[in-house]
């Protein structure tokens, strides 16, 4: 596929210089304040349809590597793989190497140009160790994810990574869409405010104000959510009749290295700029 053809599939026709200045000062200030930013219609309809088709083909039958709902042990998940719904896919892993179209999206100017602005660096790398997956939520057996920051289990020189979440269909509270707590990426939380799995404790009054300030990141197909690795977020169950599919990659700057010997350094990161 030629670059010009791929750009057409992405839905925009920006030059490199335009891509690198795609976000204005207001958007950059909003990301700095809130820890997340939504870019509407960043991926074109054709790209979304083709990615969704690849994902559906990988779900039936389920194409490894993947993680099942029973593996996550989140509220609402089946108790084991042998239980009813235990083999419901939760994440299709290693998305970057599953198909060239995922690679094209992850390395696209639409994504990388904005990351250069948000991360204030010309050297961006994609992590193959964190996210790098297709998130699915199936009706009937989906679980909920409690309030957390992604970096809690990650090991880098600095907690300064950005994730890029592409919605391939409508995402809202009824089908387990994302909820964000603005500004939490700038805050430090005492260990006592977190439970044993490092989720924000909901039984503490001091956490309730934060939780009550949460906003819904409602998305449509092609919308992209950029969010800081320290921004607290959560998601509910899918109570609709349709599978929800999302593609998510995480990026770091060249000078923010994974700690050797940790899970963050298992696979080499991919330069995308």
Image (cartoon, rainbow, N blue to C red):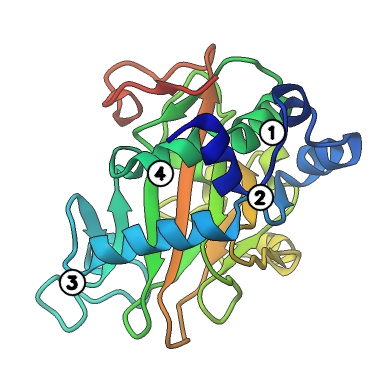
- x 52%, y 31%: residue: 3
User: What residue did someone put label 1 on?
Assistant: 114
Q: Residues within 10 Å of mark 1 (few under 14, many from 20)?
A: some
Give the CA separation, mark 4 to mark 2: 15 Å
User: What residue did someone put label 3 on?
Assistant: 87
Q: Residues within 10 Å of mark 3 (few under 14, many from 20)?
A: some
- x 55%, y 62%: residue: 234
Of all residues, the one furthest to the top in this rendering is: 255
Of all residues, the one furthest to the left in this rendering is: 82
Q: Earlier in the sequence, mark 4 or mark 2?
A: 2
Q: Quadrant of residue 16?
A: top right
Q: Earlier in the sequence, mark 3 or mark 2?
A: 2
Give the CA separation, mark 2 to mark 1: 11 Å
Give the CA separation, mark 3 to mark 4: 27 Å
Measured as percent of width and height from the top left, residue 186 is found at 72, 38
Measured as percent of width and height from the top left, residue 232 is found at 60, 52
Image marks 1 and 3: residues in contact by CB distance under 8 Å: no
Q: In front here: 31 or 232?
A: 31
User: What residue did someone put label 2 on?
Assistant: 42
């Amino acid at each position: 596929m030629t670059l010009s053809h791929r750009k057409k599939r992405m839905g925009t026709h920006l030059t490199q210089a335009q891509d690198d200045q795609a976000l204005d000062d207001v958007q950059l200030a909003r990301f700095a304040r809130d820890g997340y930013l939504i870019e509407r219609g960043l991926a074109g309809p054709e790209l979304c349809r083709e990615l969704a088709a690849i994902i559906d083909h990988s779900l039936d039958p389920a194409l490894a590597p993947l993680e099942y709902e029973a593996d996550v042990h989140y509220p609402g998940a089946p108790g084991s793989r042998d239980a009813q719904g235990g083999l419901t896919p939760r994440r299709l892993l290693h998305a970057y190497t599953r198909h060239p179209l995922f690679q094209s999206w992850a390395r696209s100017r639409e994504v990388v140009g904005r990351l250069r602005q948000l991360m204030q660096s010309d050297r961006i790398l994609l992590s193959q160790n964190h996210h790098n997956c297709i998130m699915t939520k199936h009706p009937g057996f989906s679980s909920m994810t409690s309030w957390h920051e992604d970096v809690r289990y990650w090991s880098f020189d600095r907690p300064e990574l950005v994730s890029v979440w592409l919605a391939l269909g409508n995402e809202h509270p009824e089908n387990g869409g994302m909820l964000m707590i603005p500004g939490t990426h700038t805050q430090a939380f005492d260990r006592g405010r977190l439970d044993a799995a490092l989720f924000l404790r909901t039984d503490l009054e001091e956490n309730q104000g934060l939780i009550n300030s949460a906003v819904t990141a409602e998305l449509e197909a092609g919308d992209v959510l950029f969010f800081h690795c320290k921004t607290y977020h959560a998601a509910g169950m899918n109570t609709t009749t349709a599978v929800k599919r999302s593609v998510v990659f995480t990026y770091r700057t060249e000078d923010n290295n994974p700690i050797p010997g940790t899970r963050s350094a298992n696979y080499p990161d991919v330069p995308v700029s």
